[in-house]
Image: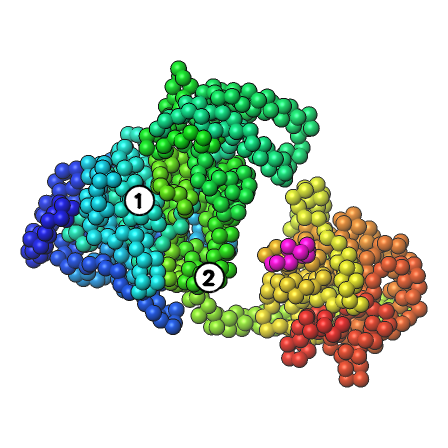
Amino acid sequence: IASASGLPTMPIMHLHAVVVGLSTLLLSTFPIVDSFGVHSKLGAFYRSTSTYNYVPIAHRFRSKIRPSGLSTLKQSNSEEDVEPQAIVTGYSQSLDLINALTEATNSALSQLPSGNAARIDLGLVYISSLYDGQSQPSSVVPCVLDICSRHYGVENEEVVQKLIGCYAGGLVGSKPNIRTKGNEGGKNTGQACLPLENESANGVVVTLCLLPDTKIETFHVLGDDVPDDIGRVSPETWKNSVGLRGFDSDTSSTENEIDDSPTIMLLPSPAFQNELDDFLRGLSNAFGPSATIFGGVASTVSSLSRARLFRFDVSDPYCTQTLGDGCVGVALSGDVQAKVIVAQGTKAVGGVYRVVAGEGSTINAIQLDEVATEQLNADIDGDDVDEEDEESSLEENMNAKEIAAAAYAKAAIPKPVLAEANFLMKTLSDDEQSFMSKSLLVGLERSGGMAKTPNELLRLAQGYGHRFTVHQVASAGMRDGSVTLPLGSVDIEKGARFRFYVRDGEFAKKEIEALWMGYKKRELEQIFNDSKPSTDTFTPSGCFLFPTLDRGSKLFGGKPGYESSSVSEFLPAIPSVNGFFANGVIAKLGENDPHVMLHGSASCYALIGSKSNRPIYSATEAAAKNKQEGKIEEETQINSADMTEDDKLTMRAKDLIDNVNDQPAPRSENGELILKRREVHSGRALTVSSVEWSVVENIATPSSALEGYMWDKETEVDRFRERVPLSNLVSQCNLANMDPSQPNPRDWIKSVKLALQEKPFVIIPEIKRLEPATGSLRRRYDISKLAKQLTLSGAAALSVNCDGVLFGGSIEDITLAREVSSKSILESAAAETGVIAPPVLASDLILYPYQLYKLRLAGADAVNLIVGALTSKDLLYLTKIASTLKMQVIASVTSDAQIHWLTKLSPGSIAAIVVSNRNLETFGFDESGEQALKLLQGDALNEFKNVNTDIPVLVEGRVGIATREDSMEKYLTALKEAGAMGAIVGGGLTIQDEGTKSYELLSSEC
């Protein structure tokens, strides 16, 4: 009372010091009088709270008062020397209030900077009104204060300096997007926080703010304290009346060259709304038009609950308040600012009118503004229509236009508002008629006119703000057809433009998106504005979100969390989103509006940040940094594990190659290897009745590396068949072909041909883990990283070796490479130029149709067939199956005989031919590269090209490694001169020049 009235507070401080010196027994029985006049005993309160029976909070009676003055902004050359601004949020849905407060507060504390000097400048607490009656409301503030003090363990020092809060009918919170073991909430979304919304359920949101170099004052004002003679009261007298004595008005700090206009956040009770208009006008008058004022009216889930307000201020030793009336708020000045966005969620219907008769807040008659309406219709006709509009018939469109034209013609004379509203309803949809019959919304044009376009969404996306301020009609005159807006909300002027509105969820979504686009457009313009200093760059440290109770899942088609998720979607780096569902929101509709107003149905987004471009603390970024600092040791361990795994795979591959007969492999008359399929006696499982037998006598030894490779591949396929039968794969492929949402195979060879139009020789990178003869190709095999790098480097197509027998791959590599490459294109600027993700060729030893179905489901666009491992019958069968699956076939050959087999196929059976330097008997390479050159220059290939005139010829094996006359470039030149159009290169991208040979360098040499 002394503080509010301006009386000296020193005697109270002396008494407070005496109280601190009393014994613990006296403290535990010291009576506290809350705002409702209820006497309670601190000790009895804590003893009665079973889940909260630890240390009493004697800090409520400490004598040390820490003044909150505005200090000079730090000047430092190092960003690390500047104390960051931080806003962190904790959230809990525990059914017990004390447990929920404990969980939410501890969650918020865990996100604060580790080097924080035990001072929290501001706390915000929002409590679900469902706890009312379960626990004493007066326990909220002491609980939060005590947990914060115990967290830091600071004696005789208050941790939380200021705190305000209220009851709410719904909550908005967030948690940091940190992925850890056991934390299933962490998602790889690229967003710093994961917003949460809770409507009509138990919950607590606690937000803690570190605001360096900021002056902060909290206040509580009752309706009787608000002067109603604003024009005759000085700003200082008015501020004294509402508890803001000594808080500076709208000034600029010349010392730091930073505008010191204040930011004021309000949390009024519902009963305070009658005085709210006078209070808002008084704030604007006292602090000037540049003051930023926003907030939300406290709410409850049920009308049976009473809205409560909370306030604590360290400068007032008795200010631990739980209040039932009035308005609590916090005023901030210094290195803090807020940028406010308001979404109205309403769609205009009908034409544009002019007010022709009205007075005060009552509108009596309106008349159609034909010029403005024609401009509006011309703008709508010029816009792109939605897909649903495109599907509607021409006749329906004409009927709608005729109906609208008739309505406008009849409205071209002055008419009562209700009469025009009733006539307009006949032209609306059933849903819009239903809404308009229950609630009448009208809009009055703001200053600034229609700017460059009358289209509301386009205006918002361009950053011009709303054209009309929407009001809900408070009452209507049934005799004269007039409508009256809430008292004090507006003064009606004759000639003002006027429109009717309905609430629409789909339009509200588009409005939110357009508002964020407009905000980002203005921020970009600010960044590129050379006349503004670099300190004007605004980076928000948090978003305070206040939607009204009729929004949320009720407005957005049952989808919870739409508005809060839009914040993190458009501002992915924002560390915190918090707020509550309010009975009304307080804000200017536009930055340049002269008056702050109460919006009965809207959402207020208040972005809080620094004026001096101070560093912003993010718990997610801090966790990522800590993870990065420990990455060296972790990578060492991972690399060691990867090397161990690669060593095992390499040993297995070498064992398979070495486990062949010492004798030369048998060959046919045309020089091809004679290959036997795996024999039953070599280990195939036999099932007799319900018993499975494995006959292992007479184990065969492969005669060549290819034969052993084939046997192991057959065993691998058999294991897959045991898990998933072929019939299941066929069904899945059929369903995928019929599902339009599933991606279809892309044209692999078309991408290669397009690249050939730009250069005569194309390098197609192959992603593979190891070579059986040489071992691991990379120190660490990261297919995601490789696919992204190759995609962004401009690779026309990719080849992925998914064989797990000799090359250490897996079929999942196909899926991962496709997803990563597509995502990389979408996230890069290349998407805007029409560049598509490179299609994927699956490289494997394919022997059965079963493998083709698996590769199709994995996302392969094309498959590579090793012709030397197949009979002509198998070759024909597999190419037909691949064609039905819409996958292209790339055939790899190592001899003229294999080329002859391909020539016998129908034209179009294969999309490209690859001449290889691979030796199928040993699965090594012809290191000289002459094998591929001889095939390119041979008659067999010429005969093939005469039959298949439009099929590219590629090379694989040692390209980028093999040399001619000690020059790799000369070998590439020889390949091009021999007719090769490109090469599939794997090892050549990693081995040359100690692993530094890149795809870009090799491509540039072609």
592 displayed left or right of 309? right
| Residue of label 1 | 284
Q: Position of residue 322 (x, y in %)?
A: 21, 42
Magenta stretch: includes residue 829: yes
Instruction: Tell me which segment is drawn in magenta.
Output: 828-837
Residue type (three-letter) at the residue carrying disc 2: Ser
Describe residue 342's horizontal placement relative to residue 459 as left or right.
left
Q: Position of residue 121 (x, y in %)?
A: 27, 56
Query: Furthest-top residue in view?
Result: 479
Give 648 or 374, whichever is nearer the viewer: 374
Local SS, label 2: loop
Residue 183 versus residue 304 in the image, above or below: below
Q: Position of residue 129 (x, y in %)?
A: 30, 37
- The residue located at (76%, 72%) in the rendering is 1006
Residue that numbered label 2 is attached to: 531
The answer to which quarter of the image holds residue 925 is bottom right
- Using the image as rendered, state which of residue 523 and residue 585 is in the foreground: 523
Question: Quick check: is 172 in the magenta stretch?
Answer: no
